[in-house]
Amino acid sequence: MKPKVYITRKLPDQVITQIRERFEVKMWEEEETPVTYEVLENEIQEVDGLLCLLTETVDESLIKKAKNLKIIANMAVGFNNIDLESATKHGIMVTNTPGVLTETTADLTFALLMATARRLIEASYYLENGDWKTWSPMQLTGQDIHGATLGIIGLGRIGEALVKRAKGFDMKVIYYNRSRKAEQEKKLGITYKSFENVLKESDFICLMVPYTPDTINLIGENELSLMKKNAILINTARGGIVDEDALYHALENKEIWGAGLDVFEKEPVPLDHPLLALPNVVSLPHIGSASIATRLKMADLAITNLIAGLQGDTPPNLLNK
Ligand code: DGY
C-alpha cells in the first residue's frame, strides 16, 4: 500500500506529479482559501506525510491526532506555524525550504526599501488620482538610498544577500546578530554594532530574524524611540517581530519617517488596520518569495523533503534536533 500524503493547498501539476507516482495524494483544491483547521484535524489522522504552508497552524492538539504521521514538510523557510517541539516529542520530522528563496526575498526587501524611501506607491496614486498639476520643488520628496546607512538585524542568508544589493547603492552597512560574524564582516565590508547602536545609527533598518519566542515584539516603543527621525523600518520577516501599536504611534507622531511592511501580525491584515491608513507606510501581502521560479523551487524542495522522509532517508532540510 502506498503511503498517504495530504497537501494543504493546490500546487501546480508540474511539481506534484512526482509524488502522485509514489504516494496516495489528497490535496486541498483551493488556491485562494486556506484549508480549515477542522478539515486538517480530520485529514491528519490517517496520513503518513503532510505538506503544508505558513498559513496552517500545526499545533500540539493537531499533532496528537495524527496516528501515522512521519513528516511535516513546510513550504517556507520560516516554521513558526509548526510546534516543532511537540512534533519532535511525537517522533515526527519537520522540514522547511531554506536557500531557494534567499535571493528573491532579498530582491523584494530592497524593492520595498526603495518604494518606501521614494514614496513610489503614493506617487503612483497621486498621478492616477489626477493630483499631478505641476512639477514642484518639494513635491513627493523622499529619502536618499545611496550613501545612507543600512542596519540589518539578523545576518542570515537573506541578510547577507541584502548586503550585496545595498553595496551596489553605496550604502554603509552595519548589522546586529546574536553571534558576531567576523568572516562575513571582512568578505562583505560590513560592521558589527550592538542592537541599540544599529537602531540609533541606521537610516534604514531591515528585520531579518526568524520569529521565535525571543523575537516577539523585538521592536517596540523603546526600540522605536532610539531610531532616527528619518529612519525607515522594513519588515519582510514576520509581523509579530514588531509591536504594531507602537509602530503606528511612532509613525503617526513622526518619531520615525516611514515603514515598509510585507508581513503583519495577523494575515491577511484586516483592511481597517490603522497602519494601512498611514501615508508613510508601504504595505504588501507577504510576497517576499513570490517569483514564479522561486515558488516552484520551494514546492519542489518541500516535496524532496517529503519523499526523503517517507522513504526512510534523512530529509535535506530536517529541523528536529
Ligand atoms: C518563508 O518562506 O518563511 C516566507 O515568509 C514565505 O516565503
Image (cartoon, helix red, strand yellow):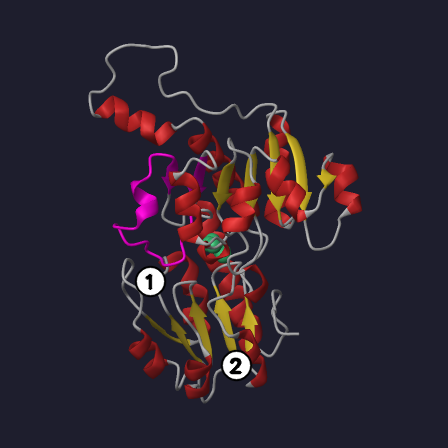
Looking at the picture, how far across and down is residue 306, in whole percent?
51, 70
Does residue 145 appear to the left or right of 266 in the view shown?
right
Lower sequence index among marks 1 and 2: 1
Above-or-below relation of 23 to 66:
above
Does residue 294 appear to the left or right of 85 in the view shown?
left
- Tally of numbered tags: 2
Could you say whether the residue bearing mark 1 is in a helix, strand or loop?
loop
Can residue 261 be seen here? The reply is: no
Does residue 178 appear to the left or right of 116 in the view shown?
right
Magenta-colored stretch includes residue 248: no
Residue type, numbered disc 2: Lys
Q: Which residue is mark 2?
A: 70
Above-or-below relation of 40 to 76:
below
Residue type, numbered disc 1: Lys
Could you say whether the residue bearing mark 2 is in a helix, strand or loop?
loop
Q: Residue at x 46, y 77 (%)?
A: 49
Quadrant (top left/top right/bottom left/bottom right) for the N terminus: bottom left
Tell me how far mark 1 sits from mark 2, CA to CA: 22 Å
Q: Which residues are magenta?
A: 258-283
Looking at the picture, how far across and down is residue 222, in whole percent?
54, 50
Residue occupying the far bottom of the picture: 67
> Residue 52 sits in which quadrant?
bottom left
Above-or-below relation of 243 to 42:
above
Q: Which residue is mark 1?
A: 10
Can residue 223 be seen here? The reply is: yes
Q: Residue at x 72, y 37 (%)?
A: 190
Give the class, few, some or many, for how many residues have Cα within 10 Å of label 2's Cα (few <14, many ≥20).
many
Magenta-colored stretch includes residue 276: yes
